[in-house]
Image (cartoon, rainbow, N blue to C red):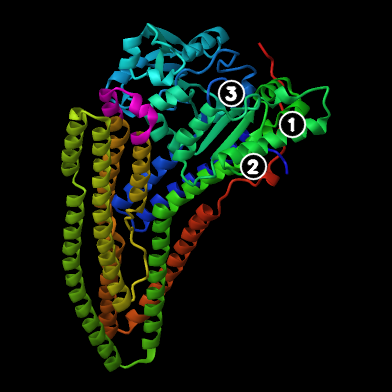
Amino acid sequence: MEKVRFQEQLKAYEQWKTDVINTIEEYGPWLEENGMSSADVEQRIEETLTTLRGDKLTIAFVAEFSRGKTELINAIFFADYGRRLLPSDAGRTTMCPTEIFYDDVRHEAYVRLLPIETRLQDSTLSQLRHDTKQWVHYPLEIDSVEQMQAALNEVIQTKTVTLEEAKHLGLYSQELHPHQDKPPETVEIPKWRHAMISFPHDMLKKGLTILDTPGLNALGTEPELTLNMLPAAQAVLFVLGADTGVTRSDMEIWQHHVKGFQSGRQRGLMVVLNKIDTLWDDLREHEDIHDAIRSQQSDTASMLGVESKAVFPISAQKGLLAKIKNEPELLDKSGLLDLENYLGQDVLNIKQQIVLDTISSDVGQMLDNSRSMLSGKLNETKYQLEELEELSDKSDDVINNLMEKTRSEQAQYLRDVDTFQQSRKQLKQQADLLSEILSLNQLDETITKCRKEMTNSWTTSGMKTSMKNLFEETRRTMLQVVTQSEQTRKLIRAIYRKFQNEHGFAVVQPKMFSIVKYRVELELLHQEAEIFRNSPVTAMMEQNFVVKRFFSALVKRARDIFQRADKEINQWIVSALEPLVMQIKDHKEMMEKRLNNLQKIGQSRNTLQYRILELQEQYTELARQLTSLRNMSNRISNNRPLHHSQRQKPKLVKQNVS
């Protein structure tokens, strides 16, 4: 199979996404033009477009120190720059979590660094991200290699502090240094807590974000990384060294910080066995080297519990060199293209499915409903047309009887509309019950109580019990929401079925709220809380630091889950009956027009032919609009990135190395 560089696959994916966005942008004006729009519909379309335009592809790199992780990032993403963009020389390693992206709001190149002292604050990384005053800002001068290297080198800087300062920051525990006879007077710690690098690279401009994480100590002491950022990534590359194999610290990172948070997830999780060039030996046969690498690949897969195909033996350093010097044979030998090809297929397919699911659950459903409603109008117009054509040679008595029948149907319909208004009131009561269960005031009281208990606890066991009780309470509340939301869903379905069964309304699917995603999210968070609660690293932290980390990294997320669920429920109740309201209005107008036609025809047969021609034109226009809608729907559902066979084989471009 042809190997395709990740850049080419990302480019095809972005073109596909652009085509989808263009189609959705066409749908909004169509709704407005056909009188099927509303404030809620416009908001839902705009929210979908905002989500798609702001869609990011996040790839996280995780490894212990000195595994060649930063060199791998340079090789995959920045080789076309002609040099190492990120510092990855021997003995120099990333000291703080680093996000590499392009700031498409400011359109600036910069390095932004968060001082390590911010660990003493209650604010989360997510909150601090928006507080620019807390960050140290270095502009990047793209035309100056020296200035860029100096600015980027800040990421690897450390500082020496007293032992007490290190403990206060949660960056030292005697248990983490069992071989030391006595605690040192000073400790070397990272200078920065987090780094953000905005760089105008083509792939970064297309929405790629790279998360470069440091070793075990930083992962263990910065829970938001493993609790928030790694699970949110579409791909996690776990980097090992072929020269070291799977060490004890590698296994600890894998179990506690990678695999544990990717529960049951195989796709998007890759293991890189780097530095296979250390096994290259001119004195050994090629087949022997190949067998040794394959054996190490198989052993690694077995130890980590992943499929062998998800373990990639590579040499990042040789792959980078091959790309810069345009040496295809060395690039093939490095194994880098195998990883890039798999990364593109595996991760971009996941990302594309997420986009399709996002569209399908909202705009896709709206498109289906528009088609269904338009088909209903088309059928009703056809029925009226056939009815009028049959009246051409009928007596006045037949027309009068038809008028009486229509008036009777209209009267019954208006009675059902009154019943519908009562159902809307009942639905509002259900919504109020849901909001009461999800009350943030009640949750905040529980959180405050838990924090007080943890702060006043004299034992680690007491703190752990308080943590457990808090999450058990949130799970009980979520179960109440599940029960109540299902009752609300049943009520909405019953309201729709009444009009579909008794008045022949076209079947449309109302927007439905599903608590499942929030319940799953809370369950995963509960698992993460249990891991944090029972982690040896947590047991070694100072009490005050544990309390801060627990509430900033975990409890805040639980509160956010309930807040988002409450907001979506309120939006759901507002919009759930909107398609039916539109149908009720259209059906009422249709019955009035039909009755009006019969009255005019009874007074003058000359009106009959005029109304037949009018309905024929209306039928033709509705059919044209339905075709237009079907085309939009097909462009969204059938749009796919180019297959690999359709792509041209990429050429390696030689770069001038400065």
Residues 576 and 515: in front is 515
Residue 163 versus residue 415 in the image, above or below: above
Q: Which residues are magenta?
A: 533-549
* Quadrant into which the C terminus falls: top right
Amino acid on which disc 3 is placed: Arg
How far across and how far down the image is residue 391, in percent?
36, 87
Secondary structure, mark 1, is helix
Amino acid on which disc 1 is placed: Asp
Q: Which residue is mark 1?
A: 332
Q: Which residue is mark 2?
A: 308
How far across and how far down the image is residue 425, in percent?
16, 62
Which is more foreground, mark 1 or mark 3?
Answer: 3
Question: Mark on residue 67?
Answer: 3
Q: Is residue 382 left or right of residue 301?
A: left
Cβ atoms at labels 2 and 1 below 8 Å apart: no
Question: Residue 336 sits in which quadrant?
Answer: top right
Q: Is residue 542 part of the magenta span, yes or no?
A: yes
Whether residue 98 appears in this view of the structure is no
